[in-house]
Structure formats: C-alpha cells, structure tokens
Amino acid sequence: MRIGELAAAVGVTTRAVRHYHHLGLLPEPERLGNGYRDYTLRHAVVLARIRRLTELGLGLAEVRDVLADDAGKDLAEVLAELDEDLARQEEAIRERRARLRTLLESEGGTAAEGPVSPELAALFRDTAHLADSPMAAKDREILALIETSAPPEERKRLMGLMSGVVDAPGGAERATAVYRLLDELEGAGPDDPRIDEAARAIAECVPAELLPEDAVLDESNSFLTALYADFAPAQAEAFRRALRRLAEGRS
C-alpha cells in the first residue's frame, strides 16, 4: 500500500502517518525500487491501534508504552486486542445512547439542571410544586452535581434515599417546610434564633444514611466549605448543625 491508501484505510491523514513515523510510533516501511514506501497489513494494524488508543484518550507517550507491550505479539493477537477495543467502544456508545433515549423520554431529563438520570428526574417532578422556592432550586442544582460526580453505585444509593424522603408519608410536606424555613433565613446572620428550628427540620427530613461512615464534617472538607460559601450565613449554619445532629444520631 502507498501512504495515501494506508491513511484512507485507517481513517487518518497522511500528515498523521508521517507524524507517527517521526515519533517512532509507526515503523518506517521498506521502500520499493521507485522510492515509494510499501506499507503492509501490519502497518495498517499498528496505525489503527494508534488511532483507537488516542480516541480512548491516551496521550502519545502512553500509546508508545502500549505499543511497546504489543511488540512481541503476533498479528492475530494484535488484531484480537484491536477487536476487543472496538467492542468496548461499541458497548460504551450503546450505553450512552440508551441513557440519552431515557433522558429524552423523561419529562425531567432535560430540566434546567439536566440532563439528569431518570431517578433524579422523577424526584424533580415530585418536587415541582416547590419551583418558587430559591432554596429548592439550589437544592436541585446540588443534587444534579452530586449525581454527576458520584460513582454509579453510590449515585444509585443516594438517589434511592432521596426518593424515599419525598415518597414517605408526609415526606413532601416536611420537605416543603424545610425549604420554607431556609428561605426565611436568607439574609439572616449565623446567630439567628430560627437556625435551630431549621437544623432540626433538616435532620428530621434527611436520612442519616446519606452521610458516609467516614464523612468529614469540619472545615477541612473542601466540598462542604464550597457548599457553605454558596449559602447565606444563617442557612450555612443551619446545615452545619443539621449535619452534626445526623452524625451524632448515627453514632
């Protein structure tokens, strides 16, 4: 194969092929009598491997390490591993498309805080009557953030616990009362006498299981520090006291 045929077969540019030669990622082929490079199937396989690895997010230095590990393998092994890479990519794409379909079909999946999971979308629908509450709106943003950053198993556990809060008898009313109390603390100072009532209401509404066993609740927890900074002083103090109540009740 000529360089243009190789590049077209793998779906890269001839410039990329020459760049990989320059970096030593792709071996230089022998030249024919007319001076043209003569690429083989092995070159195509290695080039395809480079493309797949870079598409998976590996840097060229990391690609070099992977290719070095492949150096002693025969063509059948390399092809098999390339096929496995493609299969993993296909599975990941299928999962993303399935999630996207679910979100598009969900009433809350495309909410302002979204896209979010079907479970969180359902929770948002259950609390839609609180749309006028500034604290409820902020809570939705925080829940969307937690869902995005949490590992899949932890995400499922957290969403189950939160759904249980709203679905429990009187749960929606308790959540409404909590948001009302916190909204009333907007602009209040950290010594406002209403803080204790708000803290008690939060602690009674939120399951203690939401706190990890090894949760750090002091100011060394950077997430909590950022969270408190986003609230009014009285609201932040209400959350501090509520978390302490939950931690004490769990111990």
Image (spheres, rainbow, N blue to C red):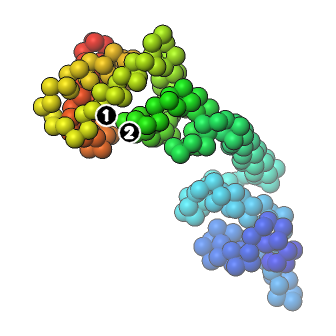
Which is nearer the eye, 160 or 71? 160
Q: Is residue 121 above or below residue 9?
A: above
Q: Provide residue 170's location: percent of width, then percent of height.
A: 45, 12
Looking at the image, is 66 positioned above or below residue 227? below
Relative height, residue 240 to residue 226 (above, below): above
Mark 1 sits on what residue? 183
Residue at coordinates 50% horizontally, 30% vertically from top-left? 129
Is the C terminus in the top left, top right, bottom left or bottom right quadrant? top left
Instruction: Name the kind of residue labelled 1 in the image.
Output: Asp
Label pair 1/2, CB-CB below 8 angstroms: yes
Which residue is depicted at the point 85% across and 83% down?
Answer: 32
Going by the numbered disc 2, the residue's amino acid type is Pro
Q: In the rendering, at what x and y percent does residue 48 appear?
A: 75, 61
Quick one: which residue is furthest to the bottom in this view?
34
- The residue closer to the viewer here, 28 or 155, is 155
Q: Quadrant of residue 109?
A: top right
For mark 2, what is the residue? 134
